[in-house]
């Protein structure tokens, strides 16, 4: 079985999102090795190994040194740990799969059958992005066989950088999110919270419009604002504290259906900034699969595909009004809107997305086998091990 060696800036046990959804499914066709960012401050370099699901093994390098992320300070340690792991497995037939260009040098001595770049975010636009990120992405485009993008905006941004860029937006596990709504479950963490409830689940960072959350809670003291997710890269002290705002923290993926099932309106209160310019929120379809109405700020990859299905509001006042309108829907209006949302959900699935990715990889591999130019050995500049070289078109 061909192996996928995946380099990710996100930890497997963090928020369950695109990488976990796709790779847990691709594990039916590939052995998946998921290499996380190094954990610094170790006494000696060592490899922690986890098996979160069938077919997926997580490698978590613990390294000497203080730098965070895929930093060059850890390059030799991680390369050695990975080489030892691969030698022990006698691993020769493998693809590389990148979620962050920062990891590209860590794979420099490997000789893969192919390279995938699954671009799920414009990481260079995030706070504290490494200065080398754009240059490494440029190099990743040079050596990649296939580039996937997580939404149309990213596709438009990246399509001119590589001859094989495919727009494969994030999808949804519809049965998972419909499960709690079908039986009327409610999560214990919110059973004592009244209603109506306006809810959000996801990472709470610089992409969230904190002022909008405060305005929503202020406008209607009788509404309960439920916020689910980890707080990252922003000061928790800056979060608005009102009687009707409930910060429930990070929850497991299995808990999300029963949380969402207890909300009357789901929201996507994204700020409009560089960090959100290219996002394609996975939660759009998850909210719909749970049968809930959705209000969002005008994120391009929400407005364009879901116009008339998701309520769009570009000011706090309009956001409040949109929530109020959905809360005031008649049963007939709500049923019709729900049917439209479920029709959208029925048109996509993570299974189909993963299958399409595997199909494109197989086609690329077949094409390369017919070409004389492909990933091949070239001497290192210093006469040492080989490095990755650009693939033939």
Image: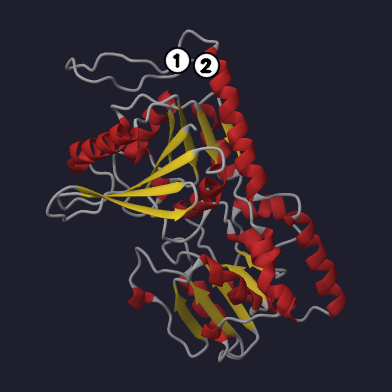
Within the image, what quadrant is residue 89 found in?
top left
Identified at 60% across, 42% down, the residue is 354
* Residue matched to label 1: 374
Residue pushed farthest left?
Answer: 43
Query: Residue 288 versus residue 254: which sits nearer the camera?
Result: 254
Expressed as whole percent of the image width and height from the top left, the position of residue 291 reads 72, 69
Give the side of residue 18 with respect to residue 97, left or right.
right
Which numbered circle lies on residue 219? none
Query: Residue 195 versus residue 63: which sits nearer the camera?
Result: 63
- Residue 68 to residue 187: above or below: above
Query: Residue 91 versus residue 353: which sits nearer the camera?
Result: 91
Which numbered circle lies on residue 368? 2
Residue 361 visible in this rendered orientation of the protein: yes
Identified at 67% across, 54% down, the residue is 303
Residue pushed farthest top?
Answer: 372
Q: Are marks 1 and 2 in contact (CB under 8 Å)?
A: yes
Secondary structure of the residue carrying numbered label 2: helix
Q: Earlier in the sequence, mark 1 or mark 2?
A: 2
- Residue 372 to residue 278: above or below: above
Secondary structure of the residue carrying numbered label 1: loop
Identified at 61% across, 58% down, the residue is 298
Give the side of residue 339 with respect to residue 148, left or right.
right
Expressed as whole percent of the image width and height from the top left, the position of residue 95 reads 44, 31
How far apart are the alpha carbons under marks 1 and 2?
6 Å
Crowding at label 2, few (<14), some or many (≥20) Cα neighbours within 10 Å? Answer: some
Expressed as whole percent of the image width and height from the top left, the position of residue 19 reads 49, 49
Query: Residue 25 versus residue 273: which sits nearer the camera?
Result: 25
Q: What colouring method underlies this structural image?
A: secondary structure
Residue 312 visible in this rendered orientation of the protein: no
């Amino acid at each position: 079985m061909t192996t996928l060696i995946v380099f990710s800036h996100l930890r497997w046990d963090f928020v369950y999102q695109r990488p976990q959804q796709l790779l847990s499914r691709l594990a039916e066709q590939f052995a998946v090795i998921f290499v996380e960012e190094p954990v610094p401050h170790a006494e000696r370099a060592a490899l922690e190994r986890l098996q979160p699901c069938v077919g997926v093994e997580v490698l978590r390098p613990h390294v000497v040194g203080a730098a965070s992320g895929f930093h060059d300070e850890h390059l030799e340690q991680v390369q050695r740990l990975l080489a030892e792991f691969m030698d022990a497995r006698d691993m020769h037939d493998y693809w590389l799969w990148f979620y962050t260009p920062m990891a590209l040098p860590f794979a420099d001595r490997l000789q893969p059958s192919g390279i995938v770049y699954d671009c799920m975010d414009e990481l260079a636009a995030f706070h504290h992005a490494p200065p080398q990120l754009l240059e490494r992405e440029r190099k990743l485009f040079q050596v990649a066989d296939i580039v996937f993008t997580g939404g149309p905006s990213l596709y438009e941004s990246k399509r001119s950088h590589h001859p094989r860029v495919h727009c494969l937006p994030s999808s949804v596990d519809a049965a998972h999110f419909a499960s709690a709504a079908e039986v009327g479950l409610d999560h214990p963490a919110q059973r004592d919270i009244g209603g109506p409830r306006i809810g959000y689940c996801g990472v709470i960072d610089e992409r969230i419009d904190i002022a909008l959350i405060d305005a929503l809670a202020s406008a209607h003291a009788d509404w309960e604002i439920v916020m689910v997710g980890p707080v990252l890269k922003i000061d928790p002290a800056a979060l608005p504290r009102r009687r009707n705002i409930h910060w429930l923290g990070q929850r497991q993926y299995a808990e999300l259906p029963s949380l969402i099932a207890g909300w009357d309106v789901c929201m996507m209160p994204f700020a409009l900034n560089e960090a959100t310019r290219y996002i394609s929120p996975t939660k759009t379809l998850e909210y719909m699969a749970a049968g809930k109405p959705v209000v969002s700020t005008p994120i391009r990859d929400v407005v364009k595909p879901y116009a008339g299905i998701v309520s769009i509001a570009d000011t706090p006042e309009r956001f409040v009004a949109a929530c109020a309108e959905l809360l005031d829907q008649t049963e007939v209006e709500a049923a019709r809107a729900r049917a439209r949302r479920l029709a959208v959900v029925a048109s996509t699935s993570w299974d189909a997305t993963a299958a399409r990715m595997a199909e494109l990889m197989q086609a690329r591999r077949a094409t390369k086998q017919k070409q004389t130019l492909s990933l091949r050995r070239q001497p290192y500049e210093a006469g040492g091990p080989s490095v990755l070289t650009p693939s033939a078109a």
